[in-house]
Amino acid sequence: MFKDKTIWITGASSGLGKHLALVFAQQGAKLALSARRKDKLEEVAVAVRDLGSSCLVLTCDVMQEDQIIQTLAAIENHFGSLDVAIANAGYGVYGRLESLEAKDWRRQFEVNVTGLFLTAKHAIPYLKKTKGRLVLLGSVAAYLPNPNTGAYGASKAAVHSIGKTFSLELSGTGVSCTTIHPGFVDSDITRVDNDGLLHPDREDPRPKNLMWPTEKAARVMVKAIAKRKKTYVFTGHGKFMAFVGQHFPVLAQVMIKKIMP
């Protein structure tokens, strides 16, 4: 499906971004990988090239609009076109809403919402040339109350709304918009503090028995992107929780209290 297609992934230095790159590489895609940590990107690039795919590494902070614009120009200059843009960069602010400072809230939305929007906005003109695919990374948290991660949940609820709007506005252009809402997937998201700094040894508080391996998650995401699904919720528990959150909000509150610290 994606052989010789050009795929741009933001936040590609670890987690879902990294494993998406590897799955696309296995299909023979050409990868443009961006993130803030170039050393980690280079490690992913080595793995991509070992799979026989070409790879372009670009340092890009999605909070800097000029860097997004420069990244897209570099991708077109190097590969000649763009077929899939995946706005994957994101992180989570931790803390009860009443304890968060303005800087925490602003950074949460600057990365997860504004950065994602600007990635999409500037990628769309390139995708229109190829009738390509726009992909936005949300979360099952968009559908549920989020004690201690309320800012994150609010940002992903915004992503959900943005995805629905893009799907409507892009109708007739040939460009599809897929918003993906994962459940619990193994990643570093809980090991990044409110200032965006990684703490590799920090314990993940999420329930281990519900956690999906990142590689498995990446594979089902690529299938959803291939089918141009408008909204895709996974894992199994994620689908169930999203359904309950939408239709049985009181039950959702009880469930969340039991499974989250």
Image: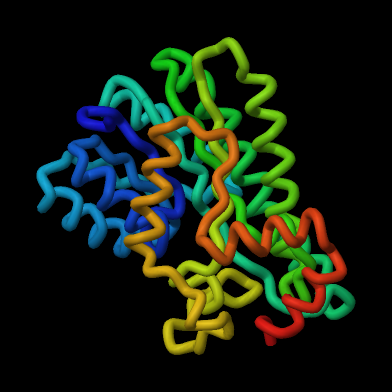
| Color scheme of the displayed model | rainbow
**Front residue of 190 and 222:** 222
Q: Residue at x 18, y 37 (%)?
A: 28
Q: Position of residue 36 (x, y in %)?
A: 44, 57
The reply, left or right, for residue 132 in relation to residue 26 is right
**Front residue of 20 and 74:** 20
Q: Position of residue 151 (x, y in %)?
A: 76, 65
Q: Position of residue 54 (x, y in %)?
A: 17, 39
**Front residue of 214 and 83:** 214
The reply, left or right, for residue 49 in relation to residue 154 is left
- Residue 99, compared with residue 91, is above or below; it is below
Q: Position of residue 109 (x, y in %)?
A: 72, 54
Which picture quadrant has residue 230?
Answer: top right
**Front residue of 224 and 105:** 224
Q: Residue at x 58, y 85 (%)?
A: 205
Q: Residue at x 63, y 27 (%)?
A: 167
Quarter holding the N terminus?
top left
Q: Residue at x 80, y 78 (%)?
A: 254
How many labels were placed on the picture? 0
- Residue 56, compared with residue 236, is above or below; it is above
Quarter holding the C terminus?
bottom right
